[in-house]
Amino acid sequence: ELIVILVESRHVFRLIYMNEKHPEDLEPSFLGHSIGRWEGNTLVVDIVGFNDKGWVLSGGIFHSDALHIVERYTRVDYDTINYEATIEDPKVFTQPFKTSTTMMLRENTRLREYICAENNEDVLRLEKLFETPELFRRNQP
């Protein structure tokens, strides 16, 4: 059994391999390697095998290749899933921490192509523009 999950509404998806073990020869990646199992009505996902180039929680919190995340998805009703993640990285954080949110169903949402920001020249152009802040000020009458 294989589950595909949409990650954080950025139109990124990852594969969750059910009832398996992480391979010994994982190639590190931005989203890591996910394995899942059911605990009652909760999908528990164990993620390892991250490279050290991404962020935790999209908030610019860096991590190392030792990042380990355990996610718990619990369906409350037709429209609602409670999400909880335990995040640990002994090379960066002094102790594990948790985050949680509520996910709501979005009827008729479609997965679209994701364009990776890595090597995106627009970011470099934007940083150059920020060197001239007057370009972003409104002219006063």
Image (cartoon, rainbow, N blue to C red):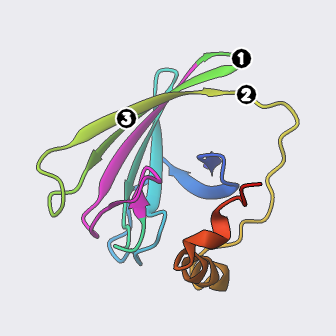
Q: Nearer the viewer, residue 38 or 47?
A: 47
Which residue in the rendered view is the most extreme toward the left? 94
Task: Inspect the magenta stretch and tell me whether residue 62 lies in it.
Answer: yes
Indicate the secondary structure of the residue bearing disc 2: loop
The residues colored magenta run 55-75
Give the Cα distance between marks 2 and 1.
8 Å
Q: Is residue 1 visible?
A: no
The residue at which mark 2 appears reads as 105
Location of residue 116 by image quarter: bottom right
Q: Please state the total of marks drawn on the protein image.
A: 3
Contact, mark 2 vs mark 1 (Cβ under 8 Å): yes
Q: Earlier in the sequence, mark 2 or mark 1?
A: 1
Report x, y in % for residue 130.
55, 74
Q: Is residue 124 above or below residue 51?
A: below
* Residue 59 is at least partly visible in this image: yes
Q: Nearer the viewer, residue 57 or 17?
A: 57
